[in-house]
Structure formats: structure tokens, C-alpha cells
Image (tube, rainbow, N blue to C red):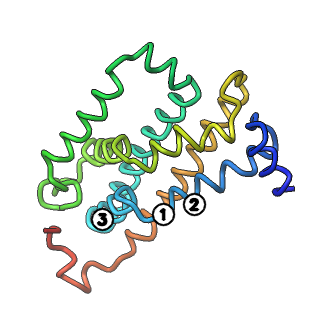
């Protein structure tokens, strides 16, 4: 079973078959569940502004992961040739956005209305600048997917796995965080320093 699949990954790379599906989803779920800036963002927005804001952050994270998956499937060398400096420009813009707001997405006061757009863009920006995501899609992701000749079903399967594994984990964080009883601890309602 899993040992055979692991040996196959190490020996030849893996097309999306049953073993690839079996391994890719839990790997992505574990990586999505690891403590990170994106997890903190989902938790804080959900706890302070409600479940919907945490889910909008999760949606931004998922869109960024889908972009990374699509770019990995398209091929990094092909991407570099086709987009040139555009990918670097997007990463720089995301970094500048984060610097400009200096973590303001984690604070309630600048976004007291709970803007869905801000929550979505915060999730997108944090993930586009996330080294963990970049390393995964550039180096580990190709172990699970045949990067040379993926067919349409492989692409759909990978995108669905990305949505359900990453989005599912972040949604669970949002659901759990919105249950944090802020009314019992007024100190939690103060913005982070």
C-alpha cells in the first residue's frame, strides 16, 4: 500500500493515480495545519470578526494555493519564460502590502467593518509570500504529480484536492476560532501590538 507508493515516488515520480491521490491529500492537509502566519490570520480574523471573515481569509489562501498548483503544473521553467518578472512582481507587491499594513490584517480596528475583500486579500497576500507554500509547490508537489504530461483529469483532481485539503483545514481553524469566547476575556478584543 503506502510503502509501495512511497517507493514509487522516490524511484520515478508519480502520475496522479490512486496512490498519488492517497498521498497528496494528507500531505497537503498536514502542511495546511502546521502553525503559520496563514493559520494565525484565519484564527484571529474569525475570533475577532466572526466566522465569515475567517472563511474569507481561507478563500484567499486557497486561491493562492490554486495559483501555486497551476504554476507548478504548468512548469516552473515554462512559467519563467512566459511570465518573466511578473511572478516576482506579484510576490513583491504582496510583501509590500504586508509591510504597509504591518500586520493590520490581524487587528480588528482598521477593519472594524469586517470587509470580505480585506480578509480575502490578506489571505491571498500572506500565502503568496509564504515560503512553506513556495517550497512545497516547487519541490515536493512534483513528487505526487506527473509534471511532464498531466491529463485533464489529473489537473481537475489536483485542483479539487487543493481546495478540499487546504480549504478544509483552514475552515476548521475558522470554525474553532469563532468559538473563542471574546466576551469572557476583554483583553482578547484589543489589537495585537
Q: CA distance from mark 3 to mark 1?
A: 16 Å
Do tag 3 and tag 2 residues touch (Cβ < 8 Å)? no
User: For this view, does 191 lie left or right of residue 38?
Assistant: left
Q: Nearer the viewer, mark 3 or mark 1?
A: 1
User: For this view, does 97 lie left or right of residue 47?
Assistant: left
Do tag 2 and tag 1 residues touch (Cβ < 8 Å)? yes
Q: Earlier in the sequence, mark 3 or mark 1?
A: 1
Q: Quadrant of residue 178?
A: bottom left
Identity of the residue drawn at 42% across and 39% down:
64
- Answer few, some or many: residues within 10 Å of disc 2's Cα (few below 14, many 20 plus, some between 14 and 19): few
Identity of the residue drawn at 41% across and 46% down:
61
Q: Position of residue 157 (x, y in %)?
A: 68, 36
Name the residue tied to disc 2.
30
Q: Which mark is residue 44?
A: 3
Query: In the displayed structure, would residue 119 be above or below residue 180?
Result: above
Per the image, label 2 sits on a secondary structure element best described as helix
Q: Position of residue 91 (x, y in %)?
A: 30, 35
Q: Position of residue 162 (x, y in %)?
A: 57, 43
Name the residue tied to disc 1.
34
- Answer few, some or many: residues within 10 Å of disc 1's Cα (few below 14, many 20 plus, some between 14 and 19): few
Q: Nearer the viewer, residue 76 or 38?
A: 76
Amino acid at each position: 500500500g503506502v510503502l509501495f507508493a512511497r517507493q514509487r515516488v522516490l524511484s520515478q515520480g508519480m502520475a496522479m493515480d490512486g496512490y498519488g491521490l492517497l498521498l497528496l491529500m494528507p500531505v497537503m492537509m498536514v502542511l495546511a495545519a502546521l502553525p503559520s502566519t496563514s493559520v494565525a490570520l484565519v484564527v484571529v480574523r474569525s475570533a475577532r470578526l466572526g466566522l465569515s471573515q475567517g472563511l474569507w481569509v481561507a478563500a484567499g489562501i486557497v486561491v493562492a494555493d490554486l495559483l501555486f498548483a497551476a504554476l507548478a503544473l504548468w512548469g516552473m521553467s515554462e512559467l519563467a519564460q512566459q511570465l518573466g518578472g511578473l511572478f516576482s512582481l506579484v510576490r513583491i507587491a504582496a510583501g509590500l502590502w504586508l509591510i504597509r499594513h504591518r500586520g493590520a490584517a490581524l487587528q480588528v480596528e482598521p477593519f472594524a467593518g469586517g470587509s470580505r475583500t480585506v480578509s480575502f486579500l490578506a489571505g491571498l497576500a500572506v500565502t503568496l509570500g509564504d515560503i512553506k507554500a513556495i517550497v512545497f509547490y516547487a519541490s515536493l508537489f512534483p513528487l505526487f504529480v506527473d509534471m511532464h504530461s498531466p491529463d485533464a483529469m489529473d489537473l481537475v483532481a489536483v485542483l479539487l484536492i487543493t481546495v478540499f485539503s487546504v480549504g478544509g483545514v483552514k475552515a476548521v481553524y475558522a470554525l474553532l476560532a469563532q468559538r473563542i469566547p471574546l466576551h469572557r476575556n476583554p483583553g482578547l478584543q484589543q489589537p495585537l501590538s
